[in-house]
Amino acid sequence: QVQLVESGGGLVQAGGSLRLSCAASGRTFADYVMGWFRQAPGKEREFVAGVTKNGGTTDYADSVKGRFTISRDNAKNTVYLQMNNVKPEDTAVYYCAARPSSDYNFWGQGTQVTVSS
């Protein structure tokens, strides 16, 4: 198993930037594909970004392409989400998740991101 703890959320103005971090502990971090998801009030949780085990390939939701960047540092057991040019519709609880095979089985507790207009 792997334990995940997110940090870096907060209040930011529209057009600003924020960097989320997710620290992992437990099993070997490099064994997992990592992802960021978010859930806004009254909405279902949605995929935001993902990165392969070695960090070589990334994937993004259309709504964040060109604004958000996912990266990972396997030496630090950490995955990041750099959020630039944020919009009020980015307001949500952001979760990181680990995928050992086909499904994201392990989740953090989430960190709140609020974007003011």
Image (cartoon, rainbow, N blue to C red):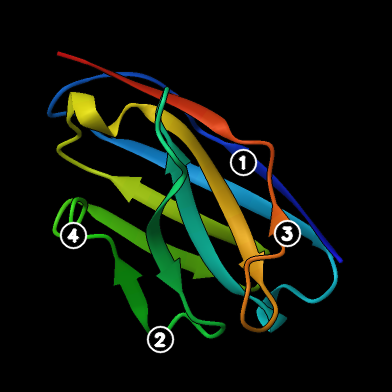
Choose top left, top right, bottom left or bottom right for residue 100.
bottom right
User: Which residue is found at the position 20% from the left and 34% from the top?
Assistant: 86
Mark 2 → mark 1, Cα distance in angstroms: 22 Å
Mark 4 → mark 1, Cα distance in angstroms: 23 Å
Is residue 38 depicted above or below 103 in this figure? above
**Where's residue 45, x and y in %?**
47, 44
Is residue 28 depicted above or below 71 in this figure? below
Q: Earlier in the sequence, mark 2 or mark 4?
A: 2
Is residue 25 depicted above or below 56 in this figure? above
| Amino acid beneath label 4 | Asp
**Callout in the foreground (2, 4):** 4
User: Which residue is found at the position 63% from the left and 66% from the top?
Assistant: 104
Q: Residue beneath label 3, please? A: 106
**Callout in the foreground (2, 3):** 3
| Amino acid beneath label 1 | Glu
Looking at the rendered structure, the secondary structure element under dot 2 is loop
Q: Residue beneath label 4, please? A: 62
Q: Residue beneath label 2, please? A: 56
